[in-house]
Image (tube, grey):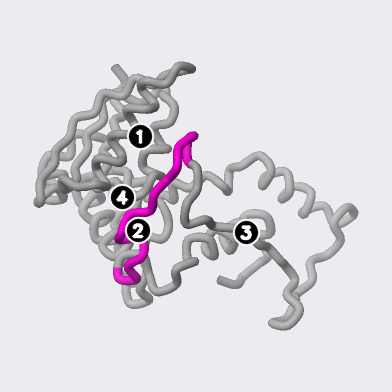
Amino acid sequence: MPEIRLIVVDPGHFHAALVQKEMYPTLSPRVQVYAPLGPDLIDYLTRIARFNQRAEQPTGWEIEVHAAPDFLDRMRGEAPGSIAIFSGRNSAKVERIAAAVEAGLHVLADKPAIIRREDLPRLEAVLKAAEARQLIVADMMTGRLDVVARLIRVLRSDPELFGEPVAGTQDEPGVRLSGVHHLLKMVAGVPNPRPAWYFDIIERGENAGYDALSRLNKMTKVVDSTCGFG
């Protein structure tokens, strides 16, 4: 059995389940889940059950759930894995990432890692601690590795084909991107209801469209490394 094991911590967003949409030969099928008992955990387990039971290419995840109010302390003390997955509630995400790093775990987390400016020094300290311990703390969103984005970047880097970038101004930006982020959408073939905390600015952040905006900002930098804003 592969030694690389996942630990999923309080999976409040469907991104956590999508990590397990497929099986990976280098990952153990046994996954530890630490979370409070509630609708977020039930939603995650339901999604994994659908992946395991689908007709085509079913997965074979074996989930061991540790549901308790002190889930983070238990994860920190037991740490029966290699990679911790964080997806969902944003207000305490950086502290949870810090707990995983202290436990010697690599981290995959969805954006944003922080939602308050004053938390930036804490995030920087966590990243330095991870580097010192030779641990990886990475963004789990894969848009930067998308084939289309990589091809666009190659085309953009050819001045004979693309030309030179326009610096742009506030009134006439050099880059224009747009996107649509639905409150209700289909994920893995089923409707995706938003949890109540999704609409709580304390948990999600003051900007309700932050997720969509940060995605566009990130993709701009992925396609064009000369962009220095954001």
Which range of residues does the magenta coloring cover? Answer: 187-202
Q: Is residue 200 left or right of residue 39?
A: right
Q: What is the three-letter code of the residue carrying label 1?
A: Arg
Which one is earlier in the sequence, the residue at label 4 or at label 2?
A: 4
Screen quadrant of the C terminus: bottom right
Q: Quadrant of residue 227?
A: bottom right
Magenta residue check for 26:
no
For mark 1, give the secondary structure. Answer: helix
- From the image, which quarter does the N terminus lie in? top left
Amino acid at dot 4: Gly
> Between marks 4 and 2, how big is the CA–CA gap?
23 Å
**Callout 4: SS:** loop
Q: Residue tagged by mark 1? A: 47
Give the residue displayed 26% in from the left and 30% down from the top.
Answer: 31
Q: Quadrant for residue 174, please give it.
A: bottom right
Q: CA distance from mark 3 to mark 1?
A: 26 Å
Cα separation, mark 3 vs mark 4, equals 23 Å
Earlier sequence position, callout 3 versus callout 2: 2
